[in-house]
Amino acid sequence: MRTRIGTQVILGAGLVTALTIGALAVLILRAHEAALVGELKRGADLLSETIKSSTHYDMLENRRDNLHRQITNMGRQQGIEAVRVFNKEGRIVFSSDASEIGRAVDKQAEACYACHAAGRPLERLPTAARSRVFPAAGHRVLGIINPIQNEPGCATAACHAHGPRDTVLGVLDVTVSLAGVDRDIAWGRGRMVGLAAAAITGSSAILWWLNRRLVVRPVEALAEGTRRVAAGDLSTTIPLTERHELGELARAFNDMTRRLAEAQRQLTQADKLASVGRLAAGVAHEINNPLTGVLTYASFLLKRAAGSPEQRQDLEVIVRETKRCREIVRGLLDFARQTPPRRQGTDLNEVVRRAVTIMMNQLALHRVALALDLATDLPEASADANQIQQVVVNLLVNAADAIGDGGGEIRLSTRATASEAGPGAEIVVEDGGSGIAAADLPRLFEPFFTTKGTRGTGLGLAVTWGIVQSHGGAIDVQSEEGKGTRFTVRLPLAAPAGPGPGG
Ligand code: ADP
């Protein structure tokens, strides 16, 4: 059976809270009870002393009736259960309950044990040792005993009841009811249990909420995202903005899916371009020969044409359109070129300058200004200078087309970079032209994709892409419609020159 993390956390934390609060409640209740009973003991002790001193003279004078009356009256006071006087032999000689007078108690019984434990009565005992709590008639009772000491006045009294050698003559025993205290304790216990239950419920609710917000929801979002990615949806992003570890995890996850999507896009692109390339190469090869024939014979006919001007005009159209066909076929053959680049240590700044020279007139014609920003410390790239020059020219032609006849500026720069794939050199072509619609971006490098109608072949970027790929490089485009476009071509560096023969 699957138990949720949240449930386990709450159960664990709830148990700890319950144990802590329970232990605290027990300690507090015990302290409360000890305080109440202690207070009552002091009261009972005071009462016992008061009884002793108020009956002192009646005892000295042996006024038994007086004594009996006083003790009976005291015993009737509210909260007092009984007041008794025991003689040395443990017989009750006075009691607020007349029926028990004369009854003897066992000196080893609980009430007497403290004093008689050592076999003989003790004269002085702390209050704690003189008191005891025991159950009686449905409630608890606190008893406190108070030894009645012999005094010179007593030993020499006329009654001659006690000899001078007796130290303790008897014991005054006062018992008070603990019913009130027990009620207080029960009420306190009830209140404590209620408070503890409220505290446990409250803290569990807060924990539940925190756990749901901080752990469960982010984890569910991550799990859902992982399932979607596993099902092939690489556009999945997890909308987590938390700044804790799970937020980090979500960011790492989003980063991972973005890279996977990019890798997949590139693979699909490479696949598509490779098959289109093979097809194009085949078709171009087949068409090239008959096309050359058509062009040769059409040009031949035009040269010798003696017919009407209309016939000449028709032949001129045939020649022009056939030349256009030949351009397209050439482009296709370029795109599908199987020749691997002849790569060597190349100064990209030099390549860029050569491309600019080729393009200068065309750019000036369109009133396009060129801002060059070439890195001075650019390391040599591993490249085929001619092919890369073609790449730069293609990008410049497109940039100029995008700017149109209104005039504008192209920024062309080079720079050294360090990416995850290692150090490299970049050529960046930026224009402030028409920009590219977001919907067109994924198709940009496809052969025959063009927005220029019959003016375009849609092969420039496909060829560019093929060249960059065969260099082990990468081409990246960023564009905003109406604002402009930036193409970045990244090429690997040439291996550093090995150590000389001596080194
Ligand atoms: P062509 O230039 O013959 O159309 P390309 O493959 O060179 O073929 O370009 C394909 C399409 O990409 C262009 O038709 C154009 O829509 C778009 N494009 C390329 N470069 C840019 C750019 N710098 N600004 C705007 N659009 C561009």
Image (cartoon, helix red, strand yellow):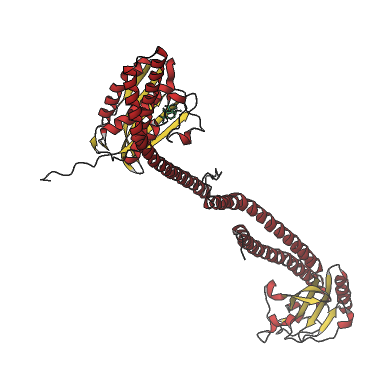
Q: Where is residue 164 in the image (x, y as percent from the top left)?
A: 72, 83
Rendered image quadrant of residue 490: top left
Q: Is residue 334 left or right of residue 456?
A: left
Q: Position of residue 19 (x, y in %)?
A: 64, 64
Q: Position of residue 227 (x, y in %)?
A: 55, 53
- Compared with 262, 463 (above or below) is above
Q: In this view, does 297 lie to the left or right of 29?
A: left
Considering every residue shown, the one lying at the far left of the view is 502
Q: In this view, does 310 lie to the left or right of 201?
A: left
The total of numbered circles placed on residues is 0
Q: Position of residue 297 (x, y in %)?
A: 33, 25
- Compared with 256, 429 (above or below) is above
Which sits in the foreground, 406 or 257?
A: 406
Ligand 1 image position (quadrant): top left
- Compared with 501, 81 (above or below) is below
Which sits in the foreground, 437 or 298?
A: 298
Rendered image quadrant of residue 340: top left
Considering every residue shown, the one lying at the far top of the view is 309
Which sits in the foreground, 314 or 413?
A: 314
Rendered image quadrant of residue 474: top left
Residue 305 visible in the displayed image: yes
Q: Which residue is drawn at 79% across and 85% down?
A: 161
Which sits in the foreground, 143 or 242?
A: 242
Quadrant holding the N terminus: bottom right
Residue 489 visible in the displayed image: no
